Image (spheres, rainbow, N blue to C red):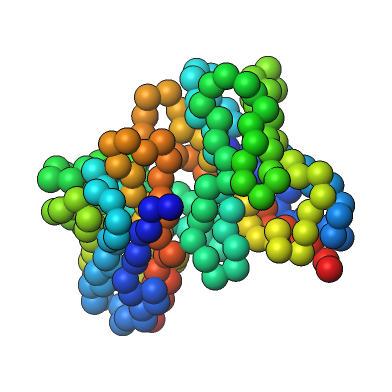
Amino acid sequence: GAVVSQHPSRVICKSGTSVKIECRSLDFQATTMFWYRQFPKQSLMLMATSNEGSKATYEQGVEKDKFLINHASLTLSTLTVTSAHPEDSSFYICSASSVSSETQYFGPGTRLLVL
Amino acid sequence: AQSVSQHNHHVILSEAASLELGCNYSYGGTVNLFWYVQYPGQHLQLLLKYFSGDPLVKGIKGFEAEFIKSKFSFNLRKPSVQWSDTAEYFCAARPGNFNKFYFGSGTKLNVKP
């Protein structure tokens, strides 16, 4: 199956700093990438959808200036958490799909801890 | 609000027991339904999906799910679980023509050897 990677897998940062998370599709061209956030014992919450070469579409309640998403190529999307605060600590998961795929392929997730 | 509900948060079974995990969704129109599994330390993987046609769909590893439109349900079943089925299972729905997935809260399955 299609492979999606995320980097880093775990990051700890100080409050007020920015953190960038990368999502890569390794063996297919991802025309659409999705970013989710997962709280403990809760479902994956869709944050935004990004199509290659265009601006991301954010879900209601997600601050686009806080969570910057870039999808500059068909194999890479980045999520930057700007001026991170402890409440941003969470598990961030990306997924990717191509024009022909009926499903999404998920990355392994990134655990962010903001101190 | 559109949502996907999984009522069983944690299920513990012995090997060879039968499994049924509930999933209900709240969309009124056309919907595609999915079950994903996440084994410890691994990515989410697709178990099976329903788009149209036969409401009983078969997936990998002996899993199946039945779409019952009148009940807005898409329950996951397996006749005889194995220890290796220990994982977290997520139901997801994709409404209509939107390329967005909405996930349930997940069910952790522990199978005792």
Locate residue B71 relative to residue A3 in the image: left or right. right
At x 19%, y 50%, the residue is: A74
Residue A46 in the image, given as x and y percentages of width and height: 40, 47
Locate residue A23 relative to residue B40 in the image: left or right. left
Residue B85 in the image, given as x and y percentages of width and height: 70, 59
At x 60%, y 63%, the residue is: B39
User: Across the whole image, how many numbered discs are drawn on residues?
Assistant: 0
At x 66%, y 50%, the residue is: B61
Residue B110 in the image, given as x and y percentages of width and height: 75, 62
Locate residue A38 relative to residue B16 in the image: left or right. left
At x 41%, y 36%, the residue is: A102
Query: Looking at the picture, does residue A114 appear above or below residue A92?
Result: below
> In terms of depth relative to the viewer, which is nearer, A62 or A108?
A108
Quadrant in the picture for residue B91: top right
Q: Is residue A87 visible?
A: no
For the C terminus of chain B, the quadrant is: bottom right
Query: Looking at the picture, does residue B96 appear above or below residue A69?
Result: above
Q: Is residue B95 visible?
A: yes
Residue A13 in the image, given as x and y percentages of width and height: 32, 81
> In terms of depth relative to the viewer, which is nearer, B6 or A9?
A9
Quadrant in the picture for residue B101: top left
Query: Looking at the picture, does residue A81 appear above or below residue A34?
Result: below
